[in-house]
Amino acid sequence: MLQLIEILGIISFALSGIIEARRKHMDLVGVYTVALIAAFGGGTLRDLFLDRTPLFWVANPAYAIVILMMAVGAFLFPSLARVPDRVLLLPDALGLGLFSIAGTGFALDAGVAPFIAALLGTTTGVFGGVIRDVIANEVPFIFRNKYLYATAAFAGCWLYMLLMIIGVEKGLAVIYGITAVVVLRLAALRFGLRLPGGH
Amino acid sequence: MLQLIEILGIISFALSGIIEARRKHMDLVGVYTVALIAAFGGGTLRDLFLDRTPLFWVANPAYAIVILMMAVGAFLFPSLARVPDRVLLLPDALGLGLFSIAGTGFALDAGVAPFIAALLGTTTGVFGGVIRDVIANEVPFIFRNKYLYATAAFAGCWLYMLLMIIGVEKGLAVIYGITAVVVLRLAALRFGLRLPGGH
Amino acid sequence: MLQLIEILGIISFALSGIIEARRKHMDLVGVYTVALIAAFGGGTLRDLFLDRTPLFWVANPAYAIVILMMAVGAFLFPSLARVPDRVLLLPDALGLGLFSIAGTGFALDAGVAPFIAALLGTTTGVFGGVIRDVIANEVPFIFRNKYLYATAAFAGCWLYMLLMIIGVEKGLAVIYGITAVVVLRLAALRFGLRLPGGH
């Protein structure tokens, strides 16, 4: 089940990466590189930090091939590049939720402490986008966009773990955790919620 | 003993990261992220390069929790954000010395050659700050600040190893090595020492 | 044989890194850091992703020492800093070819799927330069220079694998693969070849 969620997260993040790269008029290799980094970056850090081998995308070559087909598709349907800003936010929020909860699950499977599992889940969800922005020489999204991004992921990771502790079935806890991240993120965007202290 | 030094280095670097992030008006998540990267970045690279598992901060969840409490504390005492530039340099120099020598020690324990141990020690001391600056989309400190930063760390790592070779007791060699890094760095700042060739 | 190729690649990339850093008037530590990152970055990612231990430059301390001697040499012969832009492109193309094919070979030895081997080979060839640019806070070469950089590496990796599949002797396949990358890259620069879609 964690793997199915991971696949959906990969597709969501690859899509957001492809749309962003197309809007910057990158060529096919640039688009594919950005999509790979957005989709694989967070999970790669998680696997390296947990010493999980082989890496998830080395073990599943289909992931990289599917993203190549998506990148090629973006050139056949160039209207994707003209999608409004808002549309990018949905696959991104979905990827954030899917990756954060899957990352927390993998970390718990590896036997780490809950606080570290929540940190690694958040890292899995957030750092694909951070590395993508760093590589593109931009101030990362996470520092620019103040509307509960890492915070939503972190809160969802804890909800997922707390639900399992009080005896909720794992599959349900996963779904509630993902939903919490996505709803919290979209609500923060919609209503302008932000943490105190930043500006 | 290496672990005690590591803890002091983590606190020093987390402090310098928190002060810097507060001065940039980041919110709690931004401050915590910068502090984690500054405190964990160099040691994470070292552990990955040496294939030490689990990572030091995965094995010791208390580190991440203490840094969270420090980040929260920075919001309760906002005057921290108004600290003058100079005050940042002391915890930073201390973190540099502590991490460089601890990193060299861990590398020697892993059986690598002395030259590589000095490189990995310097990496441990320097790259937390480099990654912090890269993530914040700035030219890294190490390339901007010409006053013997990596050089001080590298020299201290060699002093530490040479002292042990000539039979100095390990605990003393550690203290001399750390002191050499801190004194060299602070003296370079005070007297404007720099390497030839750069400007 | 893969190791001999790796050594040549390290020297090529270290040279391109040193020339670039000298032109930016960096001091010795800056030049050495940039040279190390350019020469070791791609292979380090490959080794981490494949969980190959110890890392190639930890296992061979001579690599880091040779690059230090090259960096010191660049200060004794400062005319290197005045080399025209074009001259940088040859060692860079050579390093790209050598690292990409060696990286593909190491990945195949580790038993990964061909598509992933080609991706990891391209990563080995390309990401030393990407990390070098990211650390120096520039938009990476790979996104600025549209003349078949990653594409040349990727194509050469596939040629190398296809030649071995149809029974060509490994040593010959390596030479043809490297030649293909270098010729494709230099031809693209000479004739302004680029992928469609980018501008």
Image (cartoon, coloured by chain):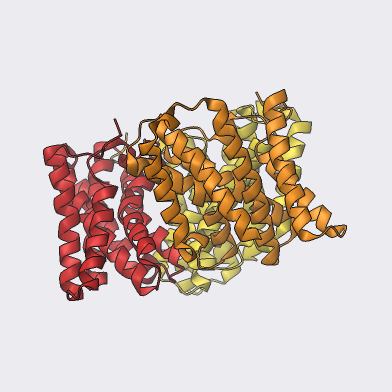
Chain colours: A orange, B yellow, C red
Q: Nearer the viewer, residue B35 or B191?
A: B35
Residue B75 horizontal/vertical position (percent): 75, 32
Give me the residue at 47% from left, 52% from top.
Answer: B153
Instruction: Determine whether, in the image, residue C182 is placed left or right of residue C21.
Output: left
Quarter where residue C194 is shown: top left
Give me the residue at 61% from left, 66% from top.
Answer: B54
Give me the residue at 56% from left, 66% from top.
Answer: A51
Quadrant containing the N terminus of chain B in the rendered view = bottom right
Quarter where residue B57 is shown: bottom right
Instruction: Determine whether, in the image, residue B148 is placed left or right of residue C73.
Output: right
Q: How many marks?
A: 0
Is C78 drawn above or below residue C122 in the view shown? above
Residue B36 horizontal/vertical position (percent): 63, 47
Residue C77 in sight here: no
Residue C68 horizontal/vertical position (percent): 29, 57
Residue A166 horizontal/vertical position (percent): 88, 57
Give me the residue at 72% from left, 37% from top.
Answer: A183
Quarter where residue A25 is shown: top left
Residue C171 in sight here: yes
Quadrant containing the C terminus of chain B in the rendered view = top left
